[in-house]
Amino acid sequence: MGEFLLLSNPVAHYVPTWVIVLHGAILALMILALALEEKIHANKSVITGIAAMIALIVGELTGVLSLFDGGHGHVPFYVEFIDWGVIAIILGSSLFVEVTTQSGIFSWLAIKLTKYTQGDPFKLLVAYSWMTVVFSAFLNNVTAMIIVGSLTTVSLEKLNRRDLLLGFLLAEGLLTNIGGLLTLISSVPNIILGNAAGISFIEFTYISAPYVVIATLCTIYLASWRFGIKGLKTETEKSESKKRIAAFDERDGIESQSFFVLSWVVFIGFILALATTDVIPYIKELGIGFVAMAFGVSMLLRVKNDVQKVYVKTDWDLLFFFAFLFVVIGVMEHAAVLEQIGGLVAGLMNIGETTGPLALLWASGFASSVTDNIPLAAMLAKTLQPLSQGPNFASNIWWATIYGCNLGGNITPIGSASTVVAVTIIARNKLSLGFVGFVKQALPFAIVHLILASVYVWLLGILL
């Protein structure tokens, strides 16, 4: 086909192939620049910011953005491309964690967990891995990564094992996307595709839970093997660890008992609010982003005379990176680049009853690794839903798409918000892991996850 119908605009219009190719080249160049981030000495936000400006200018020149001139009121139309819910979750969670950290609850919890595992690095990896999966399933991936990443850093610093921090944080970043497959509401692609497929909450969980358990166990094993995270074996090692842990005092970081108790109450309330946002009247319309911001801003009251210190520690580069990235993806959507990708991915389902769903899984995985998986999931849902009424449509095609859109986030650091957060925490701890480094380290995990998903989707095709 020489032209593609642009369905996302209020008034449908056709986008010539050369326009799609031109915008696709901009997306490819942005990804290449992010891969060469360390060599060109530019932060992620600078790269995506320049890409956003170029994409908007080219979008105007080629007419794909002509329907959006003027925006709504005084708000520029491209501001609407930004997923403010994600921005609010990151900013609100970061403010909340930064302030509550000062109360000592995270150091207290990290030391308690370290003592419970007796300072055994492997047991600690197991504990934090399952914590990441549970948090990701019932809260959201970004918040899970921010909280668990903070706890992990404290634990390993206390054990004087910062050499293991990279392996822990990388595994946790990957596990956020595994945990995101546990429930229908764990990720936006789950909601989009699950609703389009007519999958209920309970059905989603009991079908996906076996895969999540197996993939988590494999991730723990691979992380242990690749990063040398071993358990304590000899009596000498256990004795030394016991002496070291005996010197730990979980009360050390607590300066105010009232602040400590208040932080625990608010932290538990924060988790419960995030987990039940979708069922709380009025709040469900405001969304998870509002909940995160509300708790974050509320905690600022505790340090209201010294909020500058909290603002200084906020990762503004991460926030601007996402804002600019959403603008780029928004232009790509209206230039029909994502529609073309979605069409090509969905077309793979026709190559065979068995091979079709597997090809769809891998293709959607690699597609979501370089684009935002939310608009991609929306495009695939629009493409697959009419076809699902046909007699030859297998139910495991939906599961292949769901797994692909989620697991693609483990291939590159821009594949999901939580992996971006993981890389940011790694950089904040002065550990070197750029775009290319992440791909080198994460790709073996991602391939294992996709292979496991392929086997599981194949079994679902037989059983369902």
Image: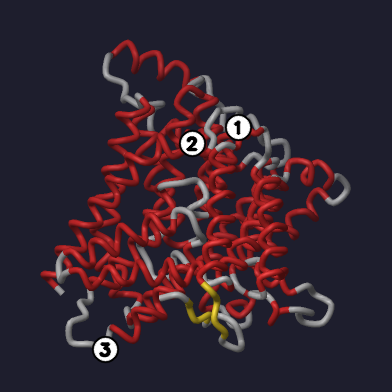
Q: Are marks 3 and 2 in contact (CB under 8 Å)?
A: no
Q: Residue at image x 31%, y 47%?
A: 216
Q: Earlier in the sequence, mark 2 or mark 1?
A: 1
Which structural element holds mark 1?
A: helix
Q: Earlier in the sequence, mark 3 or mark 1?
A: 1
State the image coordinates of residue 140 (x, y, percent, origin top left): 50, 60
The residue nearer to you, when weighing 289 against 458, is 458
Q: Residues within 10 Å of mark 1 (few under 14, many from 20)?
A: some
Q: Which residue is mark 3?
A: 389
Amino acid type at circle 1 is Glu
Look at the image and tell me in which quarter the N terminus lies.
Answer: bottom left
State the image coordinates of residue 244 (x, y, percent, origin top left): 47, 18
Q: Which picture quadrant has residue 57?
A: bottom right
Which label was assigned to residue 421? none
Amino acid type at circle 3 is Gln
Which label was assigned to residue 38? 1
The residue nearer to you, when weighing 200 against 118, is 200
Amino acid type at circle 2 is Val
Q: Residue at image x 58%, y 62%?
A: 23
